[in-house]
Structure formats: C-alpha cells, structure tokens
Amino acid sequence: MIEHEIKNRSDDNVIYVGKKPPMSYVLAVVTQFNTTGSDEVIIKARGRSISTAVDTAEIVRNRFMTDATIKEIKISTESVTNEEGRNSNVSSIEICLTKKKKD
C-alpha cells in the first residue's frame, strides 16, 4: 500500500493516500495549498484507500477551504504484482482539487 508522502519531483502537488486517518491527508492538502501557493492539488489512492481519498477531498471542500472545487476525477485499474509474483488488478483514483484565485 502506498503511504502518505509528498514527492519533491515535478508532482510535488500530489498527496498519496494510504492507511492513515483522513484528517492526516486533509492537513497535507491544506498545507500544500497554503504554503506552496499551489492552485491545484491532486489526491491519489489505490484499492481500499479510495474511500479515504474521497473523504479527504470532501472534508477539505466542505470544512476547511470552501473556495476549493473538484476540477477532475480520474479512475483507472492498475496491474500490481504481489509478493508471490501474481498479478492482480487494483482500482485507483485521482482527485484534482483547485482553489479559486483571489482578486
């Protein structure tokens, strides 16, 4: 399972959702918007973490940043090889949140 991390590559505005509670990721999203000045943050999750990603996006939009909107949602299936060498299909989601610019 992918744990929460903020990559320092070109996708530094991506939050990877794992097994932590949703509020951990809400803090990461709000921090990403406020400290880096990003206009866009992407929340990514796979498998059982998808519901946590959806909860995170909704908590951010409804409680913390009411000016944030969902720009795009991408869903897909990824083929993952487990420890025994078998392939299995895992659902994944990307939720793109954007913040309106202040005039």
Image (tube, rainbow, N blue to C red):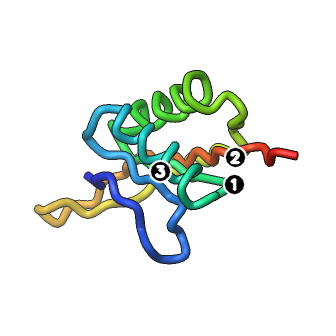
- The label on residue 98 is 2
Q: Amino acid at mark 3?
A: Lys
Asked whether 44 or 60 is in front, the reply is: 60
Using the numbered discs, state the Cα–Cα distance from disc 2 to disc 1 in whole angstroms. Answer: 6 Å
Using the numbered discs, state the Cα–Cα distance from disc 2 to disc 3 in whole angstroms. Answer: 15 Å
Asked whether 72 or 37 is in front, the reply is: 37
Q: Secondary structure at mark 3?
A: strand
Q: Is residue 24 above or below residue 38?
A: above
Q: Residue 13: x and y, percent?
A: 54, 60
Asked which quadrant contains residue 47, the reply is top left
Residue shown at 30% from the left, 32% from the top: 21
Q: Name the front one of labels 2 and 3.
A: 2
Asked whether 5 or 46 is in front, the reply is: 5
Q: Amino acid at mark 1?
A: Asp
Q: From this viewpoint, which residue is outermost toward the left?
A: 84
Q: Residue 18: x and y, percent?
A: 31, 45
Dots 2, 1 in contact, CB < 8 A:
yes
User: Residue tagged by mark 1?
Assistant: 39
User: Residue tagged by mark 3?
Assistant: 44
**Dot 2 or dot 3, earlier in sequence:** 3
Asked which quadrant contains residue 57, the reply is top right
- Label 2 crowd bin: few (<14), some (14–19), many (20+), radius 10 Å: some
- Label 3 crowd bin: few (<14), some (14–19), many (20+), radius 10 Å: many
Residue shown at 66% from the left, 54% from the top: 40
**Dot 2 or dot 1, earlier in sequence:** 1
**Dot 1 or dot 3, earlier in sequence:** 1
